[in-house]
Amino acid sequence: MQPIQVRSEIKQLKKVLVHRPGEELLNLTPSTLEELLFDDIPDLSLAQEEHDRFTDILRDNGVEVVYLEDLMAETLDANEGLREKFLDQYLEESGTTDKDILEKAKAYLEKIEDTKEFVEKTMAGLTLKELGLFKKEDLHQMVVGKSYLAINPMPNLYFTRDPFSSVGNGAVVNRMYSVTRNRETIYCDYIFRFHPEYKAVPDLYGRDNPYHIEGGDTFNANENTLLIGISQRTQYEAIELLAKKLFFGENENKIEKIYALKIDESRAFMHLDTVFTQIDYDAFTYHPAIIKEMEVKVITPGDNNELHIETASGKLEDILATALGIEKVRLIPCGGGDPIAAEREQWNDGSNTLTISPGKVLVYKRNVVTNQVLRNEGIEVLELDASNLTVGRGGPRCMSMPLVRED
Protein backbone atom coordinates (compact mmCIF):
# COMPACT_ATOMS: atom_id res chain seq x y z
CA MET A 1 0.00 0.00 0.00
CA GLN A 2 1.14 3.53 -0.81
CA PRO A 3 1.92 5.82 2.19
CA ILE A 4 -0.83 8.11 0.90
CA GLN A 5 -3.89 6.76 -0.90
CA VAL A 6 -6.93 9.05 -0.95
CA ARG A 7 -9.31 9.24 -3.90
CA SER A 8 -12.56 9.89 -2.08
CA GLU A 9 -14.11 11.84 0.79
CA ILE A 10 -16.25 8.94 2.00
CA LYS A 11 -14.67 5.51 1.43
CA GLN A 12 -13.60 3.65 4.58
CA LEU A 13 -10.99 5.69 6.42
CA LYS A 14 -7.98 3.49 7.19
CA LYS A 15 -5.25 5.84 8.40
CA VAL A 16 -5.34 9.46 9.56
CA LEU A 17 -2.86 12.13 10.66
CA VAL A 18 -3.67 14.26 13.72
CA HIS A 19 -1.90 16.52 16.21
CA ARG A 20 -2.72 16.31 19.91
CA PRO A 21 -3.00 19.88 21.25
CA GLY A 22 0.08 20.81 23.25
CA GLU A 23 1.62 23.67 25.17
CA GLU A 24 1.16 25.97 22.19
CA LEU A 25 -2.31 26.62 23.65
CA LEU A 26 -0.73 27.87 26.88
CA ASN A 27 0.97 30.64 24.92
CA LEU A 28 -2.31 32.11 23.70
CA THR A 29 -3.17 35.42 25.37
CA PRO A 30 -5.98 37.94 24.79
CA SER A 31 -3.50 40.24 23.06
CA THR A 32 -2.50 37.57 20.51
CA LEU A 33 -5.86 35.88 19.81
CA GLU A 34 -6.63 37.81 16.63
CA GLU A 35 -3.14 37.35 15.21
CA LEU A 36 -3.17 33.63 16.04
CA LEU A 37 -6.71 33.13 14.66
CA PHE A 38 -8.49 32.07 17.85
CA ASP A 39 -11.73 33.41 19.32
CA ASP A 40 -10.96 32.43 22.90
CA ILE A 41 -8.36 30.64 25.02
CA PRO A 42 -9.00 26.89 25.38
CA ASP A 43 -8.31 24.94 28.56
CA LEU A 44 -5.36 22.75 27.53
CA SER A 45 -6.16 19.77 29.75
CA LEU A 46 -9.78 19.71 28.59
CA ALA A 47 -8.76 20.19 24.95
CA GLN A 48 -6.42 17.19 25.26
CA GLU A 49 -9.16 15.10 26.88
CA GLU A 50 -11.50 16.01 24.04
CA HIS A 51 -8.88 15.22 21.42
CA ASP A 52 -8.17 11.86 23.07
CA ARG A 53 -11.90 11.07 22.86
CA PHE A 54 -11.74 12.05 19.18
CA THR A 55 -8.90 9.61 18.45
CA ASP A 56 -10.54 6.88 20.56
CA ILE A 57 -13.65 7.11 18.37
CA LEU A 58 -11.46 6.80 15.27
CA ARG A 59 -9.64 3.74 16.60
CA ASP A 60 -12.91 2.13 17.70
CA ASN A 61 -14.02 2.42 14.07
CA GLY A 62 -10.96 0.72 12.61
CA VAL A 63 -8.84 3.79 11.84
CA GLU A 64 -5.09 3.82 12.46
CA VAL A 65 -4.11 7.14 14.06
CA VAL A 66 -0.66 8.66 13.57
CA TYR A 67 0.58 11.91 15.09
CA LEU A 68 2.30 14.79 13.32
CA GLU A 69 4.72 15.27 16.22
CA ASP A 70 5.75 11.59 16.07
CA LEU A 71 6.33 11.60 12.30
CA MET A 72 8.41 14.77 12.57
CA ALA A 73 10.53 13.33 15.38
CA GLU A 74 11.07 10.14 13.35
CA THR A 75 12.07 12.28 10.37
CA LEU A 76 14.74 14.15 12.32
CA ASP A 77 16.06 11.01 14.04
CA ALA A 78 16.40 9.15 10.73
CA ASN A 79 18.62 11.76 9.05
CA GLU A 80 21.96 12.81 10.49
CA GLY A 81 22.33 16.58 10.63
CA LEU A 82 18.70 17.23 9.69
CA ARG A 83 17.71 18.52 13.13
CA GLU A 84 20.31 21.28 12.83
CA LYS A 85 19.10 22.19 9.34
CA PHE A 86 15.50 22.23 10.50
CA LEU A 87 16.32 24.41 13.52
CA ASP A 88 18.05 27.01 11.36
CA GLN A 89 15.09 27.13 8.98
CA TYR A 90 12.59 27.23 11.85
CA LEU A 91 14.34 30.24 13.37
CA GLU A 92 14.64 31.95 10.00
CA GLU A 93 10.87 31.61 9.55
CA SER A 94 10.07 32.52 13.15
CA GLY A 95 9.00 36.06 12.34
CA THR A 96 11.63 37.73 14.52
CA THR A 97 14.76 39.52 13.35
CA ASP A 98 16.06 40.24 16.85
CA LYS A 99 19.52 38.64 16.87
CA ASP A 100 19.60 38.30 20.65
CA ILE A 101 16.31 36.40 20.66
CA LEU A 102 17.41 34.17 17.78
CA GLU A 103 20.73 33.32 19.43
CA LYS A 104 19.13 32.56 22.79
CA ALA A 105 16.32 30.56 21.15
CA LYS A 106 18.81 28.45 19.25
CA ALA A 107 20.84 27.74 22.39
CA TYR A 108 17.65 26.91 24.33
CA LEU A 109 16.33 24.49 21.70
CA GLU A 110 19.71 22.84 21.10
CA LYS A 111 19.81 21.79 24.77
CA ILE A 112 16.64 19.69 24.43
CA GLU A 113 17.91 16.14 23.98
CA ASP A 114 14.70 14.23 23.30
CA THR A 115 13.68 14.75 19.68
CA LYS A 116 9.92 14.61 20.22
CA GLU A 117 10.22 17.10 23.08
CA PHE A 118 12.27 19.33 20.77
CA VAL A 119 9.61 19.13 18.03
CA GLU A 120 6.80 19.90 20.47
CA LYS A 121 8.71 22.90 21.81
CA THR A 122 9.10 24.34 18.31
CA MET A 123 5.32 24.01 17.99
CA ALA A 124 4.67 25.58 21.41
CA GLY A 125 6.80 28.67 20.78
CA LEU A 126 9.13 30.43 23.21
CA THR A 127 8.52 33.20 25.73
CA LEU A 128 10.85 36.04 26.70
CA LYS A 129 10.89 34.61 30.24
CA GLU A 130 12.13 31.21 29.03
CA LEU A 131 15.02 32.91 27.26
CA GLY A 132 15.94 35.01 30.29
CA LEU A 133 14.74 38.20 28.62
CA PHE A 134 12.00 38.92 31.17
CA LYS A 135 12.96 38.70 34.83
CA LYS A 136 10.99 38.86 38.06
CA GLU A 137 12.03 42.45 38.66
CA ASP A 138 10.48 43.40 35.28
CA LEU A 139 7.02 42.32 36.41
CA HIS A 140 6.03 45.73 37.77
CA GLN A 141 6.70 47.21 34.33
CA MET A 142 4.44 44.74 32.54
CA VAL A 143 2.03 46.36 30.05
CA VAL A 144 -1.43 44.88 29.51
CA GLY A 145 -1.96 43.97 25.85
CA LYS A 146 1.74 43.63 25.03
CA SER A 147 3.02 40.29 23.79
CA TYR A 148 5.79 38.70 25.84
CA LEU A 149 6.43 35.97 23.31
CA ALA A 150 9.87 35.58 21.79
CA ILE A 151 8.65 33.20 19.06
CA ASN A 152 4.95 32.74 18.39
CA PRO A 153 3.29 29.38 19.04
CA MET A 154 1.38 27.42 16.39
CA PRO A 155 -1.94 26.84 18.18
CA ASN A 156 -3.84 25.91 15.01
CA LEU A 157 -1.71 22.81 14.41
CA TYR A 158 -4.40 20.46 15.71
CA PHE A 159 -6.29 21.36 12.53
CA THR A 160 -4.10 19.04 10.46
CA ARG A 161 -6.43 19.27 7.45
CA ASP A 162 -5.04 22.60 6.25
CA PRO A 163 -1.22 22.53 5.86
CA PHE A 164 -1.45 19.89 3.13
CA SER A 165 -4.04 17.81 1.27
CA SER A 166 -3.93 14.12 0.35
CA VAL A 167 -4.79 13.72 -3.34
CA GLY A 168 -4.42 10.29 -4.90
CA ASN A 169 -0.96 9.09 -3.90
CA GLY A 170 0.45 12.59 -3.50
CA ALA A 171 0.42 15.50 -1.07
CA VAL A 172 -0.54 19.06 -1.93
CA VAL A 173 1.81 20.92 0.45
CA ASN A 174 0.15 24.28 0.78
CA ARG A 175 1.05 27.92 1.09
CA MET A 176 -1.35 29.10 3.74
CA TYR A 177 -3.39 32.29 3.96
CA SER A 178 -1.82 33.75 7.10
CA VAL A 179 1.81 34.07 8.16
CA THR A 180 0.77 32.49 11.46
CA ARG A 181 -0.38 29.28 9.80
CA ASN A 182 2.09 29.12 6.91
CA ARG A 183 4.82 28.34 9.46
CA GLU A 184 2.97 25.06 10.15
CA THR A 185 3.77 23.68 6.70
CA ILE A 186 7.45 23.26 7.62
CA TYR A 187 6.61 19.96 9.34
CA CYS A 188 4.84 18.26 6.43
CA ASP A 189 7.48 19.63 4.06
CA TYR A 190 10.23 17.87 6.02
CA ILE A 191 8.19 14.68 6.45
CA PHE A 192 7.49 14.39 2.71
CA ARG A 193 11.14 15.02 1.85
CA PHE A 194 12.97 13.05 4.53
CA HIS A 195 10.79 10.60 6.51
CA PRO A 196 11.77 6.98 5.74
CA GLU A 197 8.19 5.98 4.89
CA TYR A 198 6.85 9.23 3.40
CA LYS A 199 9.78 10.74 1.52
CA ALA A 200 8.64 9.15 -1.75
CA VAL A 201 5.31 11.01 -1.62
CA PRO A 202 5.27 13.62 -4.42
CA ASP A 203 4.56 17.23 -3.47
CA LEU A 204 1.86 18.37 -5.88
CA TYR A 205 2.06 22.08 -5.04
CA GLY A 206 4.80 23.49 -2.76
CA ARG A 207 4.91 25.83 0.24
CA ASP A 208 7.05 28.39 -1.60
CA ASN A 209 4.43 29.20 -4.24
CA PRO A 210 3.17 32.80 -4.22
CA TYR A 211 -0.56 32.00 -3.98
CA HIS A 212 -2.31 30.57 -0.94
CA ILE A 213 -4.38 27.39 -0.80
CA GLU A 214 -5.53 25.33 2.19
CA GLY A 215 -6.70 21.77 2.78
CA GLY A 216 -10.13 22.77 4.06
CA ASP A 217 -10.95 23.85 0.51
CA THR A 218 -9.82 20.64 -1.24
CA PHE A 219 -12.18 17.70 -1.77
CA ASN A 220 -11.55 14.40 -3.55
CA ALA A 221 -14.83 13.91 -5.45
CA ASN A 222 -13.45 10.72 -7.01
CA GLU A 223 -10.16 9.48 -8.45
CA ASN A 224 -10.51 11.76 -11.48
CA THR A 225 -12.13 14.88 -10.02
CA LEU A 226 -11.36 17.50 -7.39
CA LEU A 227 -13.62 20.13 -5.89
CA ILE A 228 -11.72 23.18 -4.61
CA GLY A 229 -13.18 26.23 -2.92
CA ILE A 230 -12.25 29.76 -3.93
CA SER A 231 -12.52 31.26 -0.47
CA GLN A 232 -10.99 33.55 2.12
CA ARG A 233 -8.12 31.06 2.40
CA THR A 234 -7.66 29.81 -1.19
CA GLN A 235 -6.92 31.96 -4.23
CA TYR A 236 -8.04 30.99 -7.72
CA GLU A 237 -4.48 31.55 -9.01
CA ALA A 238 -3.30 28.78 -6.67
CA ILE A 239 -5.89 26.40 -8.12
CA GLU A 240 -4.56 27.07 -11.62
CA LEU A 241 -0.98 26.37 -10.49
CA LEU A 242 -2.11 23.15 -8.82
CA ALA A 243 -4.06 22.13 -11.93
CA LYS A 244 -1.00 22.53 -14.16
CA LYS A 245 1.09 20.38 -11.84
CA LEU A 246 -1.61 17.73 -11.57
CA PHE A 247 -2.33 17.63 -15.31
CA PHE A 248 1.15 18.10 -16.77
CA GLY A 249 3.65 17.35 -13.99
CA GLU A 250 5.62 14.18 -13.48
CA ASN A 251 3.29 12.33 -11.11
CA GLU A 252 0.97 9.35 -11.26
CA ASN A 253 -2.26 10.99 -10.10
CA LYS A 254 -5.42 10.46 -12.16
CA ILE A 255 -7.03 13.89 -11.78
CA GLU A 256 -8.61 15.01 -15.06
CA LYS A 257 -11.00 17.73 -13.92
CA ILE A 258 -11.18 20.38 -11.20
CA TYR A 259 -14.33 22.24 -10.18
CA ALA A 260 -13.41 25.56 -8.54
CA LEU A 261 -16.39 26.78 -6.48
CA LYS A 262 -16.56 30.38 -5.28
CA ILE A 263 -17.91 30.98 -1.77
CA ASP A 264 -18.20 34.14 0.32
CA GLU A 265 -14.90 35.41 1.74
CA SER A 266 -15.42 35.64 5.49
CA ARG A 267 -14.20 34.02 8.70
CA ALA A 268 -17.59 32.35 9.13
CA PHE A 269 -17.16 30.74 5.68
CA MET A 270 -13.38 30.44 5.80
CA HIS A 271 -13.15 27.13 3.88
CA LEU A 272 -15.38 25.09 1.63
CA ASP A 273 -15.59 22.42 4.35
CA THR A 274 -16.95 25.05 6.74
CA VAL A 275 -20.12 25.19 4.66
CA PHE A 276 -20.48 21.66 3.28
CA THR A 277 -19.01 18.17 3.45
CA GLN A 278 -19.79 14.88 1.73
CA ILE A 279 -21.29 12.22 3.99
CA ASP A 280 -22.52 9.49 1.62
CA TYR A 281 -22.36 8.54 -2.05
CA ASP A 282 -25.11 11.04 -2.86
CA ALA A 283 -25.39 13.13 0.31
CA PHE A 284 -23.86 16.34 1.62
CA THR A 285 -24.46 18.40 4.72
CA TYR A 286 -24.48 22.11 3.94
CA HIS A 287 -25.14 25.60 5.25
CA PRO A 288 -28.37 26.94 3.71
CA ALA A 289 -26.80 30.37 3.08
CA ILE A 290 -24.72 28.98 0.21
CA ILE A 291 -27.67 27.60 -1.72
CA LYS A 292 -27.91 30.17 -4.45
CA GLU A 293 -26.50 30.60 -7.91
CA MET A 294 -22.82 29.68 -7.50
CA GLU A 295 -20.00 30.56 -9.84
CA VAL A 296 -17.91 27.57 -10.88
CA LYS A 297 -14.85 27.27 -13.08
CA VAL A 298 -14.37 23.83 -14.64
CA ILE A 299 -10.68 23.23 -15.35
CA THR A 300 -9.45 20.47 -17.66
CA PRO A 301 -6.23 19.84 -19.62
CA GLY A 302 -6.00 21.84 -22.84
CA ASP A 303 -3.58 21.77 -25.74
CA ASN A 304 0.16 22.54 -25.41
CA ASN A 305 0.17 22.16 -21.60
CA GLU A 306 -2.38 24.94 -21.24
CA LEU A 307 -5.53 24.82 -19.14
CA HIS A 308 -8.99 24.68 -20.65
CA ILE A 309 -11.32 26.73 -18.41
CA GLU A 310 -15.09 27.01 -18.65
CA THR A 311 -16.93 29.44 -16.36
CA ALA A 312 -20.54 28.81 -15.47
CA SER A 313 -23.05 29.34 -12.71
CA GLY A 314 -25.66 27.06 -11.25
CA LYS A 315 -27.18 25.54 -8.15
CA LEU A 316 -24.89 23.68 -5.78
CA GLU A 317 -26.86 20.44 -6.07
CA ASP A 318 -26.57 20.46 -9.87
CA ILE A 319 -22.84 21.22 -9.78
CA LEU A 320 -22.20 18.40 -7.30
CA ALA A 321 -24.29 15.87 -9.21
CA THR A 322 -22.36 16.66 -12.40
CA ALA A 323 -18.99 16.47 -10.63
CA LEU A 324 -19.85 13.09 -9.06
CA GLY A 325 -21.38 11.75 -12.24
CA ILE A 326 -24.71 10.89 -10.61
CA GLU A 327 -28.29 11.92 -11.34
CA LYS A 328 -29.07 13.71 -8.10
CA VAL A 329 -27.57 14.58 -4.70
CA ARG A 330 -29.21 14.94 -1.30
CA LEU A 331 -28.46 18.21 0.50
CA ILE A 332 -29.04 18.03 4.26
CA PRO A 333 -29.20 21.48 5.87
CA CYS A 334 -27.22 22.50 8.93
CA GLY A 335 -29.74 23.41 11.62
CA GLY A 336 -32.50 21.47 9.91
CA GLY A 337 -33.61 24.52 7.97
CA ASP A 338 -34.15 26.71 11.06
CA PRO A 339 -32.25 29.98 10.44
CA ILE A 340 -31.22 30.54 14.08
CA ALA A 341 -30.08 26.92 14.56
CA ALA A 342 -28.31 26.99 11.20
CA GLU A 343 -26.30 30.10 12.02
CA ARG A 344 -25.51 28.93 15.56
CA GLU A 345 -24.51 25.39 14.66
CA GLN A 346 -22.57 26.36 11.55
CA TRP A 347 -20.45 28.65 13.77
CA ASN A 348 -19.65 25.50 15.76
CA ASP A 349 -18.94 23.52 12.59
CA GLY A 350 -22.25 21.74 12.22
CA SER A 351 -21.50 21.29 8.51
CA ASN A 352 -17.91 20.11 9.12
CA THR A 353 -18.18 16.33 9.33
CA LEU A 354 -15.50 13.64 9.06
CA THR A 355 -16.87 10.71 7.08
CA ILE A 356 -15.55 7.40 8.43
CA SER A 357 -17.28 5.34 5.74
CA PRO A 358 -20.28 5.94 3.47
CA GLY A 359 -23.15 7.09 5.66
CA LYS A 360 -21.14 7.09 8.91
CA VAL A 361 -19.88 10.46 10.18
CA LEU A 362 -18.06 11.94 13.17
CA VAL A 363 -19.51 15.25 14.39
CA TYR A 364 -19.55 17.55 17.42
CA LYS A 365 -22.20 16.48 19.94
CA ARG A 366 -23.20 20.09 20.65
CA ASN A 367 -24.84 20.52 17.23
CA VAL A 368 -27.96 18.69 18.37
CA VAL A 369 -30.39 19.97 15.73
CA THR A 370 -28.15 19.13 12.77
CA ASN A 371 -27.20 15.75 14.22
CA GLN A 372 -30.86 14.73 14.60
CA VAL A 373 -31.57 15.79 11.02
CA LEU A 374 -28.68 13.58 9.87
CA ARG A 375 -30.11 10.62 11.80
CA ASN A 376 -33.51 11.23 10.26
CA GLU A 377 -31.84 10.98 6.85
CA GLY A 378 -30.40 7.55 7.71
CA ILE A 379 -26.88 8.73 8.52
CA GLU A 380 -25.02 6.96 11.37
CA VAL A 381 -23.80 9.73 13.68
CA LEU A 382 -20.78 9.37 15.98
CA GLU A 383 -20.73 12.28 18.43
CA LEU A 384 -17.67 13.94 19.95
CA ASP A 385 -18.39 15.82 23.18
CA ALA A 386 -16.18 18.92 22.89
CA SER A 387 -16.36 22.57 23.87
CA ASN A 388 -12.68 23.61 24.04
CA LEU A 389 -11.56 22.37 20.64
CA THR A 390 -14.26 24.44 18.96
CA VAL A 391 -12.80 27.85 19.87
CA GLY A 392 -10.23 27.50 17.10
CA ARG A 393 -13.16 27.39 14.64
CA GLY A 394 -12.71 23.91 13.23
CA GLY A 395 -14.62 20.63 13.29
CA PRO A 396 -13.79 16.90 13.00
CA ARG A 397 -12.83 17.19 9.32
CA CYS A 398 -10.50 20.08 10.16
CA MET A 399 -8.78 18.02 12.89
CA SER A 400 -7.96 15.11 10.58
CA MET A 401 -5.89 14.53 7.48
CA PRO A 402 -6.72 11.18 5.86
CA LEU A 403 -3.61 9.37 4.69
CA VAL A 404 -5.33 6.19 3.47
CA ARG A 405 -8.90 5.48 2.43
CA GLU A 406 -10.08 2.31 0.74
CA ASP A 407 -10.09 2.62 -3.04
Image (cartoon, rainbow, N blue to C red):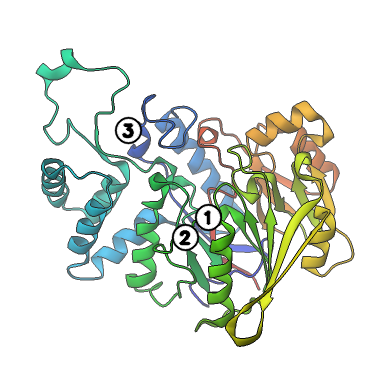
Other-residue count near label 1 (Cα within 10 Å), few / some / many at <14 / 14–19 / ≥20: many
Other-residue count near label 3 (Cα within 10 Å), few / some / many at <14 / 14–19 / ≥20: many
Residue 364: percent from the left, percent from the top?
Answer: 63, 38
| 267 relative position to 279: left or right | left
Q: Residue placed at 66% from the left, 47% from the top?
A: 353
Residue 368: percent from the left, percent from the top?
Answer: 73, 32
Q: Secondary structure at mark 3?
A: helix
Other-residue count near label 2 (Cα within 10 Å), few / some / many at <14 / 14–19 / ≥20: many
Q: Secondary structure at mark 1?
A: loop
The residue identified by callout 3 is 27
Can residue 168 be seen here? The reply is no
The span from disc 3 to disc 2 (Cα, nearest Å) is: 25 Å
Residue 327: percent from the left, percent from the top?
Answer: 89, 65
Residue 88: percent from the left, percent from the top?
Answer: 19, 57
The residue identified by callout 2 is 174
Please give the label number shown on residue 366. Answer: none
| 209 relative position to 61: left or right | left
- Locate residue 14: give its quadrant: bottom right
The span from disc 2 to disc 1 (Cα, nearest Å) is: 6 Å
Point out the residue furthest to the right here: 327
* Three-letter code for the amino acid on which mark 1 is drawn: Glu
**Is residue 73 positioned above or below 286 on the image?**
below
Task: Specify which label sits upstream in the sequence, 3 or 2.
Answer: 3
Q: Secondary structure at mark 2?
A: loop
Q: Residue placed at 54% from the left, 69% from the top?
A: 242
Can residue 384 be seen here? The reply is yes
Contact between labelled residues 1 and 2, with CB atoms less than 8 Å apart: yes
Task: Specify which label sits upstream in the sequence, 2 or 1.
Answer: 2
The residue identified by callout 1 is 214
* Three-letter code for the amino acid on which mark 2 is drawn: Asn
